[in-house]
Image (spheres, rainbow, N blue to C red):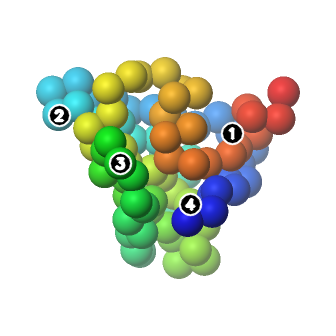
Amino acid sequence: MKEIIIHTDAPPTVEIDSTVPAAYIRFSNRKVVSTQPLDAEDMIINVDLDEEKQVVGIELIGVQQFNIEKLGNSSRTAWPHDSK
């Protein structure tokens, strides 16, 4: 799958559950109407979409490093912090 481009004016919120290990990168509080799984070798990645097919958030299960650059790269996403 190609890279996902996320358009957002606000920085994402990262929620971490170290007991699983898992992380959720939240880009908005819009209602999730569908989830798109992505292929990944070392973790499970699910992209949550709203009714307009815009990314609400990205769930990463099995992620071992918890930094925003690693989480973004693992999910093959690009959002405004990448353009600095």
Task: Name the residue located 56 percent from the left edge and 38 percent from the top edge.
Answer: 72
Q: Is residue 16 above or below residue 48?
A: above
Q: Amino acid at mark 1?
A: Ala
Please tell me the numbered disc located at residue 25.
Answer: none
Left or right of 14, for residue 79: right
Q: Which residue is mark 2?
A: 20
Q: Marks 4 and 2, Cα distance to the nearest angstrom?
A: 23 Å
User: Dots 1 and 3: beta carbons under 8 Å?
Assistant: no
Q: Earlier in the sequence, mark 3 or mark 2?
A: 2
Please tell me the numbered disc located at residue 55.
Answer: 4
Q: Amino acid at mark 3?
A: Glu
Q: Marks 1 and 4, Cα distance to the nearest angstrom?
A: 13 Å
Residue that sits furthest to the left in the current view? 19
Q: Earlier in the sequence, mark 4 or mark 2?
A: 2
Q: Amino acid at mark 2?
A: Val
Q: Mark 1 or mark 4, which is nearer to you?
A: 4
Q: Which residue is mark 1?
A: 10
Q: Residues within 10 Å of mark 2 (few under 14, many from 20)?
A: few
Question: Tag 4's secondary structure?
Answer: strand
Task: Name the residue located 68 percent from the left edge and 39 percent from the top edge.
Answer: 10
Please provide percent x and percent y for residue 70. 51, 29
Q: Marks 1 and 3, Cα distance to the nearest angstrom?
A: 30 Å
Look at the image and tell me whether residue 82 can be seen: yes
Say which quarter of the image contains residue 17. top left
Please provide percent x and percent y for residue 79. 70, 44
Q: Earlier in the sequence, mark 4 or mark 3?
A: 3
